[in-house]
Amino acid sequence: MDAGQLLASTIDGLIIGLVYGVAAMGLTLIFGVMNVINLAHGAIIMLGMFGVYLLFQTVGLNPYLAIILVAVAGLVVGLIMYVVAVHRVINAPPLSSLLSTFAVNMMIIGLATTAFSTTPRNVNYSLGTLEAGPVVITNSRFAASAAVILVTAGLYLFLYRTRPGKQIRAVANNRQAAELMGIPSTRVLAFSFGLGTMLAAVAGGLIATLFSFTVLSGSTYEVKSFVIVVLGGLGNPLGALIGGIILGIMEGIIPVFISVTWVTVIEFLLFVLILVVRPQGLLGARH
Amino acid sequence: MGRRLWHPGLYLALAVVLALGLAPGVTGGQGLRESMFTILMSVGLASSLNILVGYTGYVSFGHIVFFGLGGYVGFYTMTQLGWPLPLAALVGGVAAGILAFILGRILLRLRGAYFALATLGILEAMRAFVTNFSPFGGSIGLSLNFSAYRAYGGANEALWLTYWILVGLVVLTVVVSYLVRKSKFGLGLMAIREDEHAAEIMGVRASRAKTWALVLSAVIPGVIGVLFFFKNGSIEPSDAFRLNQSIELLVMVMLGGQGTVLGPVLGAFGYQRLRGYLLTSALFSDIQLTIAGVLLLLIVLFIPAGAVGWLRRRIPRLKTVLE
């Protein structure tokens, strides 16, 4: 066993885990506020990827600046999606919102496949690499981690320090009580949904700077987000970030010991195990 | 029992299944048989899923895991042990039932979104596991030697045999679905769907009832899996455990009307016909997924009870006819 290789895999996994964490934060935020599992999550992640790709490819915009635009677009898409597909089923049994968001997923994937086909793409933008002994890390990974930390800090400041953020937490806690306090719950729900899709789009944009992707890549990250959300506790954004780190490190380390194809088996068995043994997640669910 | 069986709620659904199932027998066309195979398979899978989703109120993303596992176990016995199709199909069903029993004991204490997510995890874990499991051929899967069809009098005869077994199986599924709906057991399931705590207070042994509902809904998909992959000639993890196929089943149940006998039958038929039409039409083939998405959204938003539920509500007299 090579200690250097292990260290390199751990650091690599940690950084990728941070990016996973952002995607999962979006999913968990929406669930925490309105008890909806957004099955279009992967499609939004994919839109984030293609947003950055297209802005870089056609306008030549710096991918990291492009992510800011993509974030705004992600927010708008989420607001529209809430009004069109989610609001009517928000109080219906879970199957309804699962299917309505899945319907949106089908629409987006269908249109995107028509527009872009399923050929792999990548954002060809390099920031160079950093070498320290056995550890070689591309600077784009550092940039991604910095972006994740910024986004997380921003989200927490927003949720805990601003009025709209506090309104979101109030609605998540008890929608009826929040309404009685004069909080416009529909507006808050729509905005929370937008915030969730914004995080998904940002995560997609960041993934695009690290890996190649296709129109169908979103679903891989969506499923990972499910695992992470359960690890961290449904509805707990900070838990999602930590869950992401755990998953990322696992993905980094496990292949050092056994065949990489076993990673998924372990991931999902752990996922089911946690659901059964500790459904509130490792850090506890929060509403 | 005899009097209860003679009810329009049952024979309407059976009439639809038989009309679909016997059509290729009349024309003798292989193309028609192929498309009816797809439709009937969906009817069987959706009706089974309905026992869990529609009657019991538990949403599963992973129902196709029973189809896949049954298919694999049956396929293994046919290719590696040389067992005949009917026996393999039986074994596939039993394997799916056993898996369902174990999963039911473990997972059914979870409610709502937690259960739905857990079933998704099981499906993904199973696919990943089978991809690594060398007796099942790993990521390449298993394939049937063409000569295996000879035991049934040639490929064509083998495929017809498979088809007729499927028709019989789907008829059985519909009868089971009806009997469950009309039985005390089914009443217990529906009580669980409406309010699990209240059901338990009323004396429904919820955890046992839920587990048997899951087993009941798993066995037939297991058998169908064997039939499908026997017809297909090969099996691989990405075909056997497709998340999208699982979700399509939910769409069918919803489309026709969850919790009804006729609903999943009509839902599966309607969905597959629509999909076939969109895929083959020159205008829509590129964006068939998008159109299907728009339709699904409209149904979920505006006709959440599905076609049969909607009819029952709009025309009260139909309540005695449609089940």
Image (cartoon, rainbow, N blue to C red):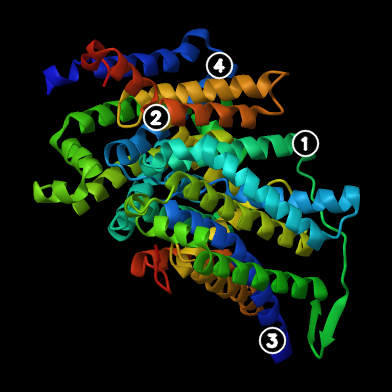
**Element at label 2:** loop
The Cα atoms of the two marked residues, 4 and 1, are separated by: 33 Å
2 and 3 marks in contact (CB < 8 Å) = no
* Chain of the residue under label 4: B
Q: Could you tell me the amino acid type at mark 1?
A: Ala
Q: Residue at x 41, y 33 (%)?
A: B46
- Left or right of A154 in this view: A189: left
**In this rendering, which labeled residue sits more in front, label 2 or label 4?**
2
Q: Which mark is residue A115?
A: 1
* Chain of the residue under label 3: A
Q: Which mark is residue B304?
A: 2
Kindly identify which residue carries mark 4.
B32
Kindly identify which residue carries mark 3.
A7
Q: Nearer the viewer, residue B134 or A58?
A: A58
**Element at label 3:** helix
The Cα atoms of the two marked residues, 4 and 3, are separated by: 59 Å
2 and 1 marks in contact (CB < 8 Å) = no
Q: Residue at x 63, y 50 (%)?
A: A75
Q: Could you tell me the amino acid type at mark 4?
A: Leu
The Cα atoms of the two marked residues, 1 and 3, are separated by: 41 Å
The Cα atoms of the two marked residues, 2 and 1, are separated by: 31 Å
Q: Are marks 1 and 3 on the same chain?
A: yes
| Residue B156 image position (x, y, % from top left) | 56, 23
- B202 is higher (above) or lower (below) than A282: above
The Cα atoms of the two marked residues, 2 and 3, are separated by: 53 Å
Q: Nearer the viewer, residue B310 or B175?
A: B310
Q: Residues within 10 Å of mark 3 (few under 14, many from 20)?
A: some
